[in-house]
Amino acid sequence: MRRKVYVTRRLPQPAIDMLEERFDVEIYPEDRAIPREVLMEKVKGIDALLPLLTDKVDAEVMDAAGENLKIIANYAVGYDNIDVDAATKRKIAVTNTPGVLTETTADMAWALMFAVARRVVEADKFTRAGKFKGWGPMMFLGGDVYGKTLGVVGVGRIGSAVAKRAKGFNMRVLYTDVVRNEEIEKEVGAKKVELDELLRESDFVTLHVPLMPSTRYLIGERELKLMKKTAYLINTSRGPVVEERALVEALRKGEIAGAGLDVYENEPELSPGLAELDNVVLTPHIASASVETRTRMATLAAENIIAFFEGKRPPTIVNPEVLG
């Protein structure tokens, strides 16, 4: 009898083909986050669950699935949507999709930097509205990127990739992390500093930390006030790393020059006033959204499920202790 896999959203077809070749696969058909009550019903009796970051997979979901559930293959590098401790207690493997989205996400951080600093979105709206009547010396003045100071908060895979790109723009690079990264120091001359110093000295602050208790509201009212009035904040990590209400106030009052956000504190909701501000560029959590990367993420999730049921170690297991 074939094992049952439930997928909470339609994914790139190569991954679905891989799974359907070996398992009975059911996919939530609508292009939106699966409602909690539907998830609770659909997991009953499944052997594997392939959820998205938007799906909360806690002890309640695992118990609803029953004892057949052996692996949760998250379609994301982060896994704060999954109660890993609860899974481990139930001997359920948890996997993620790290590495494959590093360069694409780093590209997006840079896209946001340029878009907000050079006021690309504002200028695009202006031009489309037929307001462009000719060149003007004071029109849409923004900030330079080349030669400025880049502050990278968290130099794991993605943060390091962002820092490496700074070399091409002759930027001074500061970073803060719990551990020293000698590779990035050698490659781009990056300097390790405390967060407060990084905030005070950087022209661009880009966030690349996982969401955990110590990073929730890492950037709040106090931290924003430390930044230069000419500085920009970029977030492609997790929304709750930034206290969004405080950011709205800082942007509104001109305490920082602007922000580029791909993630939000209460996705998909935005904090009141955020969407009305011209000095912030907002994208809908698309940092990994290239055809190549999203396909590779999906196939890696599928590979994790296949490896597990073939008695092999899943390539990117989060809790290897369950393998015994």
Image (tube, grey):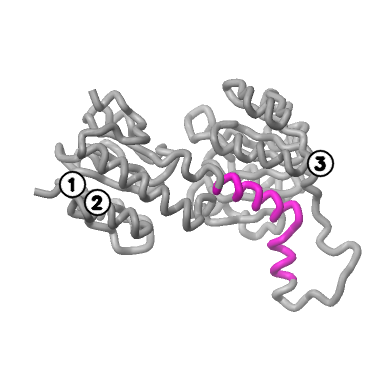
Q: Quadrant of residue 78?
A: top left
Q: How far apart are the two marked residues, 2 and 3, measured between alpha carbons?
A: 49 Å
Above or below, comparing residue 45 to residue 281 in the picture: above
Q: Looking at the image, tell me whether mark 2 or mark 1 is earlier in sequence order.
A: 2
Q: Quadrant of residue 276?
A: bottom right
Residue sitting at x 58%, y 40%: 242
Of residues 106 and 36, the one nearer the viewer is: 106
Residue 104 % position (x, y): 55, 48
Q: Which residue is mark 2?
A: 6
Q: How far apart are the two marked residues, 2 and 1, measured between alpha carbons?
A: 7 Å
Which residues are drawn in magenta?
Answer: 104-126
Kind of element beneath mark 2 = strand
Disc 2 residue type (three-letter): Tyr
Q: Which residue is mark 1?
A: 46
Q: Which residue is mark 3?
A: 147
Above or below, comparing residue 299 to residue 243 in the picture: below
Q: Is residue 37 visible?
A: no
Residue sitting at x 83%, y 57%: 141
| Residue located farthest toward the right when viewing the structure as drawn | 137
Kind of element beneath mark 3 = loop
Q: How far apart are the two marked residues, 1 and 3, measured between alpha carbons?
A: 54 Å
Residues tagged 2 and 1 counted as in contact (Cβ below 8 A):
yes
Picture disc at residue 292: none
